[in-house]
Image (cartoon, grey):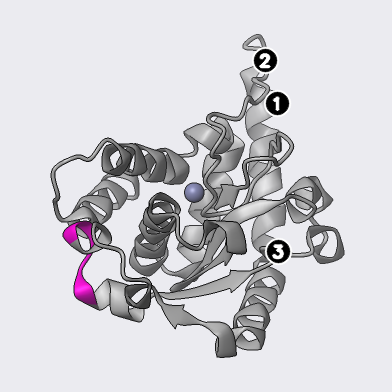
Amino acid sequence: MTPSANAETIVNQWPGSVNVQGPVPYRREPAISPFPRRQRRIMNLAKFLSRLPLITNWMNRTLADNAAHARPVADFGFVRLPLFFSADLLANTKVIVVARVPAPPFTAIGLPEFSAFGNGDYSGITFKDTYFLQTSQASNESVHFHELVHVVQWAHLGVERFLSAYAAGLEENGYRNNPMEAMAYELQDYFDRIGQPHDVETSIRSQLNQLHR
Ligand SMILES: [Zn+2]
């Protein structure tokens, strides 16, 4: 996900975002009493998991409603993405360019703690094999790259494991250090520095296997 350049600082952000402004600060709990924090984190995650069907229903409906506007990323004609991702992935990943990137209605879903995200202004967001991009980002190859990392994460983990891992990572580490985002940012940074082409999909799957052994 990619908050747009003029977005306000948002602490709770949703899967697949790129913060083009760099790391988002998050508040660390004091170290004096880690146990209550751990308990609260587990309860938050349990609450999140109980709302998973509502999130996935919303996501599937949103994808279906916008399916007519979906285009394969391969159609965008980028020259460097094919050096890092397979032709299959670029042919099968869909992009939907929109004026405003959709986000789940978290308050209605019963997760008001994520509502800052729902009101945010985003450059991109990935749901399964599809990502939404704000119109201004449609030709930004770097943002496509970031969202493609999330597409591979979704594909490797599956819907429930991806959402659970993302929520757990957010609870444990905050947005920028969430392992799912850290992986996307690190690879995107390599891409932006004109790193040598390599098989990014294999690298992502290998890193996910290390994280979720
Ligand atoms: Zn992201």
Label 1: which secondary element? helix
Amino acid tagged 3:
Arg
> 99 left or right of 87?
right
From the image, tell me which residue sits under label 3: 100
The residue wearing badge 2 is 33
Mark 1 crowdedness (10 Å alpha carbons): few <14, some 14-19, many ≥20? few
Q: Which residues are magenta?
A: 83-87
Q: Between tags 3 and 2, which lies in front?
A: 3
- Residue picked out by circle 1: 36
The reply to whether the magenta stretch includes residue 96 is no
Q: What residue do we see at 33% from left, 65% from top?
A: 156
Estimate the spatial distance between the alpha carbons at disc 1 and disc 2, rounded to whole Å.
Answer: 6 Å
Q: Is residue 154 above or below residue 88?
A: above
Find out if the beta carbon at label 1 lies less than 8 Å from the nearest ligand 1 atom.
no
Helix or strand or loop: what does disc 3 sit on? Answer: loop
Q: The residue tagged with tag 2: helix, strand or loop?
A: loop
Q: Quadrant of residue 7?
A: top right
Name which residue lies at 40% across and 40% down.
Answer: 185
Residue at figure coordinates x 51%, y 54% from the top left: 16
Q: Are marks 1 and 2 in contact (CB under 8 Å)?
A: yes
Count of marks, rendered view: 3
Q: Identity of the amino acid at label 2? A: Ser
Label 3 beta carbon within 8 A of ligand 1:
no
Q: Can residue 213 be seen at all in this image of the molecule?
A: no
- Could you tell which of marks 3 and 2 lies nearer the N-terminus? 2
